[in-house]
Amino acid sequence: MAATAWQAYIARETMRESLRAYVASQGATWVRASFQESEPTPTHVISEVGITFENSGSTPAFHLDTNVSYKFSPQPLPKDFNYPETPNNEETGGPKGHGIMPPHSPNNFIIGLSPVEDLNALMKEQTRLYVYGHVSYDDIFKDRHTSIFCFEHHLPENIFHLCAGHNDTYEGDYKP
């Protein structure tokens, strides 16, 4: 009897793991970057970074809660950096999204960057850009999951690489 109960438990857990949603960040890219030339430095910059998320699971992710933030820093992020979220309210228009993500589908989240001085310093390799955040979601079994991410921009390749930390998954809501 105990063996049958154990087999049923293993079968149920295997089904849950194979059917649930798995959402994670796949990378960061420049979506748009344009500079209005003026002397001695550009004064008008439109710059956006896109984070691609993908649900690699077999079922939709529900109650998707996404927050993407960024930080310019001349030094690497300290080990005790707390990855603060960008506020989400009517006044700041903070970059936060909600929704449903179908299985096997990518979803792009775009964040605008400013100020001009930091972007100019980035292009001159005088500062670093870190884009980080989280995506939390419910699977079809109503279990909550969270993926956290951090990307660092690298010149002269002009690409984003994973940061040394803040790239993980866990059960439950986002906990800064």
Image: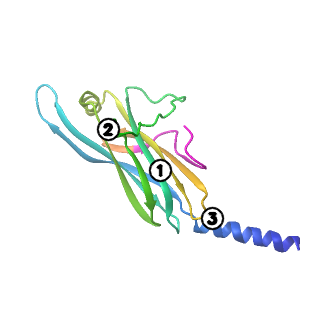
| Number of the front mark, 3 or 2 | 3
| Image quarter of the C terminus | top right
Residue 79 occupies which quadrant of the picture?
top right
Disc 2: which residue: 155
Outermost residue, left side: 38
Q: Amino acid at mark 1?
A: Asp
Q: CA gap, disc 3 to disc 1?
A: 21 Å
Q: Earlier in the sequence, mark 2 or mark 1?
A: 1
Residue 91 image position (x, y, % from top left)? 33, 35
Magenta span dominant secondary structure? loop
Q: Amino acid at mark 2?
A: Leu
Pointer 1: residues within 10 angstroms few (<14), some, or many (20+)? Answer: some
Q: Earlier in the sequence, mark 3 or mark 2?
A: 3
Disc 1: which residue: 65
Q: Residue at x 34, y 28 (%)?
A: 127
Vertical arrangement, residue 59 with respect to residue 146, above or below = below
Vertical arrangement, residue 121 with respect to residue 36, above or below = above
Vertical arrangement, residue 156 with respect to residue 1, above or below = above
Q: Earlier in the sequence, mark 3 or mark 1?
A: 3
Outermost residue, front side: 90
Magenta span: 161-176
Disc 3: which residue: 17
